[in-house]
Image (tube, helix red, strand yellow):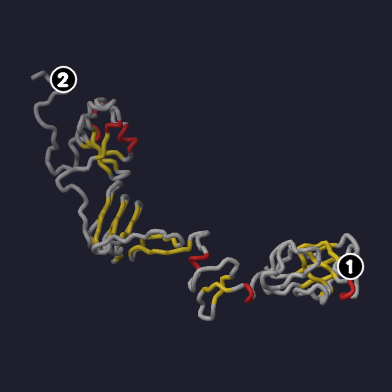
Amino acid sequence: MSQNIGTLISAAIRPNNSDDPIASAYATEIKGGLHFAETIIERDAIIEERREWGMMCYVTDDYQTYQLQYNPLVIGGTNSMNNSNWELFSGSGGGGLSVKYYIEPSDNILVPLNYQYWIYGDLTIAGNFVNYGQVVIANGGLVMSGGSFSNYGSLAFVSFVAGATPSFNDSDTIGYTVQNTIYGPSVSSFVLPNSLTASVLSSLGGPTAGYLLSVDGDGIFNWVSPINGGGLMSNADKNYIMSYDTTGDAQFAGLTLSNVPINNSYISVYVNGQEFEVGDGSTMSSSCYFSNDSGVSAKDFVGINAVQAGDGLYWNGSVAGIDLYTSWRISVHYLV
């Protein structure tokens, strides 16, 4: 055994009386053992002369205990001044948190950082509860009974169904959002953008091309023929200005329809604000008509010969009692 070096004593340093209100040594000034620091910075500032492998340091700022661990398998693991060798001390043999369902008025419960506090059922707090980690309450709620709950970490509520775990999956048209509440999961559904196709909306048979989606007296969706009405007024062919004069009947006015009118809907023609009758399949019984064969035949309002986009407006001067002239304004109104 080698001779010790330093101030040598032959007995332990102790107070004169074990009840004397003094400390025989300061933990932060001894070599190794259990030290304490207010912050991680103070822990890392412990000088080499007071460091020893296996020593511990309790940091009051985060309520954690760290141990200086020797590890020759990593770079710097044998250097006691390498602060990467401080590792969180977890303890063993039942040294974890004491989990209670009822926090008594005299209790002071602290959940440190990186710790979880799991409860199945209600957590009733009549004392003081401080959380820096995570509190998880399964199939229950947080019941305040005269105590205090200071949450600096996270609080989560989960719900378990006996024999199954609920899941919510989006469909082609419906999406779900799930939020945990003190009463369990709260689920909301919403219609996914651009997801409502014709087949989804139809409740009384499949859709037919060109038909309109309508609602009956019972509020049920149904597809109906456009001859029953509906649609929006087109403004694509308003305020057309004549660029030449016409004389006589079956004269092309220069205007062609931009859109397809709804089948069996009325088409009205205004010249300088005055309405003139439009022929329905007749070339000479009305002031004007629509044609796709240079005015030889007139288009109908309904059926296979119904007015279409691109059909031209033809004018009967003798029927209308007036010809068309340059700079006159023509407006055509119809449903699309």
Q: Is residue 125 visible?
A: no
Q: Relative to residue 269, is residue 126 drawn left or right?
A: left
Q: Nearer the viewer, residue 48 or 152?
A: 152
> What amino acid is at disc 1?
Leu
Q: Is the Cβ of the residue at disc 1 closer than 8 Å to that at disc 2?
A: no
How far from the left and from the top, in percent, is residue 56? 22, 36
Residue corresponding to mark 2: 5
Residue positioned 77% across, 66% down in the render: 291
Residue corresponding to mark 1: 324
Q: Relative to residue 78, is residue 323 drawn left or right?
A: right
- How many callouts does the rendering have? 2
Q: Relative to residue 86, is residue 301 drawn left or right?
A: right
Q: CA distance from mark 1 to mark 2?
A: 125 Å
Q: Is residue 307 visible?
A: yes
Residue positioned 29% across, 56% down in the render: 136
Q: Nearer the viewer, residue 230 or 34?
A: 230
